């Protein structure tokens, strides 16, 4: 069902691994989520595609991947560090094209920090590229997307379940980028609010994380504010454009979450009394699952 080509081992219990390739051009956003899952010894693979207005969820018989260099092959589609090649001919989806990526902008070190070494975490995260240029064209059900002078972002997740309660947002802006994730993290019998994120501006990465002292200052159903020493980061969802995606519970893709791959959001990043960035974007990615208490049990 899937092949791993980097020599690593996987948990014999429920397990998932997925990648998120976000591609933006002027006024248009498409995100691709290839993944594989294992639950109760059943193995599945899928490709979810989310546009500004629609979601497509395609099951596949196989998936192959390699971590270094990143390469994911699912069906006749290939996703990697250098770009994306698409060839899907289905009843309700005809998608072809090629996108070429510029050089990736990697983090200075693992976004998980010391938590990368903690075993049996529910979900771990990796940022492959904070921002990169992209070029190319896609044709989706007869409509052409021109990604000339476009920008991209690539991340990944793996483990056995998405957090029960979490907030995630990502936005690229003028060759800069930000990402923030706030989640309820269970470890054994304990829970804590975990924070990981970054703001990449003026060629400099500002890391925001629990392991650096970040704490949630405020959260409601549309806004989260995080404080870390002299830095403060606020993200507010102004206008939803949420579409349903499938997410893993114990390796089974049975949970429905809602993502706005391209919505209106407000961001503010400050250092003491100095505002380093403050803007509103119409192409922000947002998942606000923090106040939802129920999820399927597998």
Image: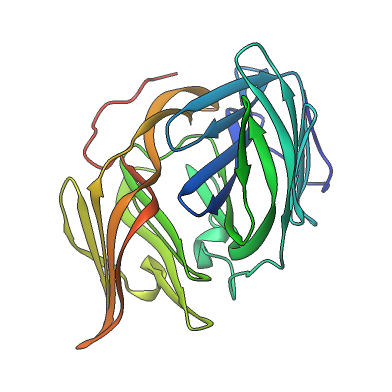
Identify which residue, 159 or 11, lies in the foreground: 159
Identify which residue, 40 or 126, lies in the foreground: 126
* Left or right: 165 as drawn, with respect to 205: left
Rendering colour mode: rainbow
| Residue 186 visible in the picture | no
Residue 241 in percent (x, y) is at 32, 38
Q: Say which residue appears at 59% left-offset and 37% top-offset.
A: 33
- Work out which quarter of the rendered image holds the N terminus and state it: top right
* Left or right: 126 as drawn, with respect to 295: right
The part of the image, by quadrant, that contains residue 30 is top right
Q: Say which residue appears at 43% left-offset and 59% top-offset.
A: 171
Q: Residue furthest top?
A: 91
Q: Say which residue appears at 55% left-offset and 42% top-offset.
A: 31
The part of the image, by quadrant, that contains residue 288 is top left
Residue 134 in percent (x, y) is at 66, 58
Q: How many marks?
A: 0
Q: Say which residue appears at 62% left-offset and 64% top-offset.
A: 132
Residue 214 in percent (x, y) is at 31, 70
- Work out which quarter of the rendered image holds the C terminus and state it: top left
| Residue 94 visible in the picture | yes
* Left or right: 36 as drawn, with respect to 48: right
Residue 283 in percent (x, y) is at 41, 52
* Left or right: 251 as drawn, with respect to 264: right
Q: Relative to 177, is 74 above or below?
A: above
Q: Relative to 78, is 41 above or below?
A: above
Identify which residue, 155 or 29, lies in the foreground: 29
The part of the image, by quadrant, that contains residue 18 is top right
């Amino acid at each position: 069902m899937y092949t791993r080509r980097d020599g690593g081992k996987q948990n014999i219990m429920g397990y998932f691994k997925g990648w998120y390739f976000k591609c933006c051009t002027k006024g248009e956003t498409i995100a691709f989520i290839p993944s594989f899952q294992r639950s109760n010894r059943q193995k599945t693979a899928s490709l979810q595609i989310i546009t500004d207005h629609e979601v497509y969820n395609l099951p596949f018989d196989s998936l192959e991947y390699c971590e270094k260099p990143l390469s994911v092959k699912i069906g006749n589609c290939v996703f990697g560090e250098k770009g994306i090649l698409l060839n899907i001919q289905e009843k309700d989806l005809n998608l072809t094209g090629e996108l070429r990526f510029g050089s990736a902008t990697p983090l200075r070190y693992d976004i998980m920090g010391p938590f990368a070494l903690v075993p049996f975490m529910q979900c771990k995260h990796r940022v492959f590229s904070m921002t990169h240029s992209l070029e190319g064209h896609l044709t989706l059900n007869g409509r052409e997307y021109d990604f000339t002078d476009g920008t991209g972002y690539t991340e990944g997740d793996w483990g056995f379940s998405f957090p029960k309660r979490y907030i995630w947002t990502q936005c690229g802006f003028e060759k800069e980028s930000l990402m923030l994730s706030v989640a309820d993290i269970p470890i054994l019998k304990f829970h804590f609010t975990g924070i990981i994120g970054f703001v990449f501006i003026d060629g400099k990465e500002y890391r925001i994380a629990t392991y650096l002292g970040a704490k949630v200052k405020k959260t409601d159903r549309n806004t989260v504010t995080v404080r870390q020493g002299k830095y403060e980061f606020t993200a507010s969802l102004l206008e939803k454009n949420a579409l349903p995606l499938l997410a893993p519970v114990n390796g089974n893709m049975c949970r429905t979450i809602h993502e706005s791959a391209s919505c209106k959001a407000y961001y503010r990043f400050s250092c003491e009394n100095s505002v380093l960035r403050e803007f509103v974007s119409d192409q922000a990615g947002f998942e606000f699952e923090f106040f939802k208490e129920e999820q399927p049990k597998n």
